Image (cartoon, rainbow, N blue to C red):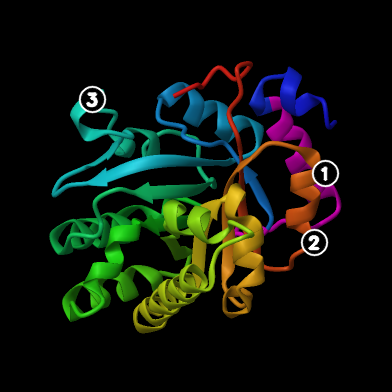
Amino acid sequence: LENSFLKQDTSISLWQLQNFLENKKLSNKENIKNLVCKHRANSFMTQYKASLSNGCFETDIFFFKDQAISTHEINSSTKLIFNDFVKSNFRDNTVWLDSKNVNKLKNCQFALSWMKKNSKNFASLLVEVPEISIKNINNQKWKDCIEKINSISNVEVGYYMPTNLISDCSIKNNNNKKKIKCEDDFLKILKFLKQTKIEAISFDYSGYQVIKDQKNFKNFKWHIWHVDSLNSFNKILSNDNIGIILLKNNKFSNNLN
């Protein structure tokens, strides 16, 4: 199976790994536990394919007043309205919503309204808020909005850990000044998570070890992307707080976006 990460369509690896987890009774869609999901499913084809193969995918979402648009960049959007997927017969999926604009209060409120209407159509939803959301630490209305989203029974809110911060802090030979700054930045994130009552974080697998070394994060659920080997997959599963794992799309994947 190790070589399959390099030689076959990502969807096949997803299906194989999810079957393994289900057969071992290690995964749970309702609780978002130990799920292997399709990364960046921003087209109907990939969303439907993921629904048929393993019932779980990640997609980029912009929330607006009357609709949710599935796209990585709104300026190059193909106007893929995610509600059209919701109306289909592909139900009971777990979906990681990389929510690009919920750091703004009005968009958070649009997201809350959308969740109230549509969350029942899914087994579960992960609503990932962008790293810039930490600037809202003193915005009580925004924090109330996030808490309301998080209180929906099958919805979980997660915070996108800054990749640049993790990368800088993972350097083994950092000087003391740099180490102190890293600790300070992580403490600021912990304060933000506590105030918003967010109990999950998401991060690039390249930062796995630095997150693991931060003992304050061990009680959070971890959602991880860019996993590209069986060895990495097994290492992640050694933890009991894993939510969603996203495999790295490779050149054999038909979804290279």
Residue 28 relative to residue 170: left or right: right
Instruction: For marks 2 and 3, give the CA distance.
Output: 39 Å
The front one of 218 and 90 is 218
Say if residue 124 shows up in the picture.
no
Q: Residue at x 18, y 56 (%)?
A: 107
Say if residue 110 shows up in the picture.
yes
The front one of 24 and 204 is 204
Q: Amino acid at mark 1?
A: Phe
67 inside magenta stretch: no
Q: Which residue is mark 2?
A: 238
Mark 1 or 2: the one toward you: 2
Task: Give the residues drawn in magenta, as a range.
Answer: 12-33
Residue 95 relative to residue 86: left or right: right
Looking at the rendered structure, the number of numbered marks drawn on it comes to 3
Q: Position of residue 55 (x, y in %)?
A: 60, 40
Q: Position of residue 228 (x, y in %)?
A: 68, 36
The local crowd at label 2, few if under 14, some if 14 to 19, many if 20 or more residues have their Cα within 10 Å, is few
Element under label 3?
A: helix
Instruction: For marks 3 and 1, give the CA distance.
Output: 37 Å
Q: Which residue is mark 1?
A: 20
84, above or below 121, in the image: above
196, above or below 75, in the image: below
Q: Amino acid at mark 2?
A: Ser
Q: Which residue is mark 3?
A: 76
The front one of 27 and 209 is 209
Q: Residue at x 41, y 72 (%)?
A: 185
Element under label 2?
A: loop
Q: Position of residue 100 (x, y in %)?
A: 29, 48
